[in-house]
Amino acid sequence: MAKRKNIPRLDAAMQRATEYARREPGKTAAAAFSAGLLLTVLPLRPIAAGLLKAAFSLVPSALLVIGLRKTCACCCAQDADLERK
């Protein structure tokens, strides 16, 4: 399996986070506690459902735009072919 480019950046970020946790254990623990509390308190299911509903409502519009772009590309290609003849 080929190694991805972003792995060294991830390793560097993990090393910086580890060094910061060793320098500031209190702040790190408080940040972890706050993140855990926030994830516990947030209503994740309704947020995810709303995002999915919004995404699915945009699918028909996106397909229409993609179809129109493809149609225009085909028409422009046919016009270019006719002009060459």
Image (cartoon, rainbow, N blue to C red):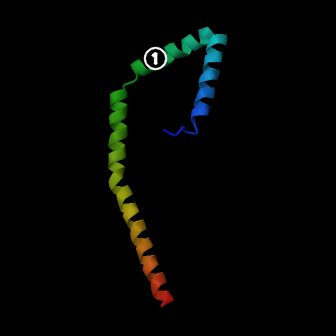
Residue closest to the eye, 46 or 65? 65
18 sits to left or right of 49:
right
Residue 68 in percent (x, y) is at 39, 67
Residue closest to the eye, 25 or 81? 81
47 sits to left or right of 6:
left
Residue 74 in percent (x, y) is at 41, 74
Within 10 Å of disc 1 (Cα), the crowding (few <14, some 14-19, many 20+) is: few
Q: Residue at x 36, y 25 (%)?
A: 43
Q: Which residue is mark 1?
A: 36
- Helix, strand or loop status at disc 1: helix
The part of the image, by quadrant, that contains residue 25 is top right
Hey, what amino acid is under mark 1?
Gly
Residue closest to the eye, 32 or 15? 15
Residue 61 in percent (x, y) is at 36, 57
The part of the image, by quadrant, that contains residue 50 is top left
Q: Residue at x 33, y 49 (%)?
A: 57
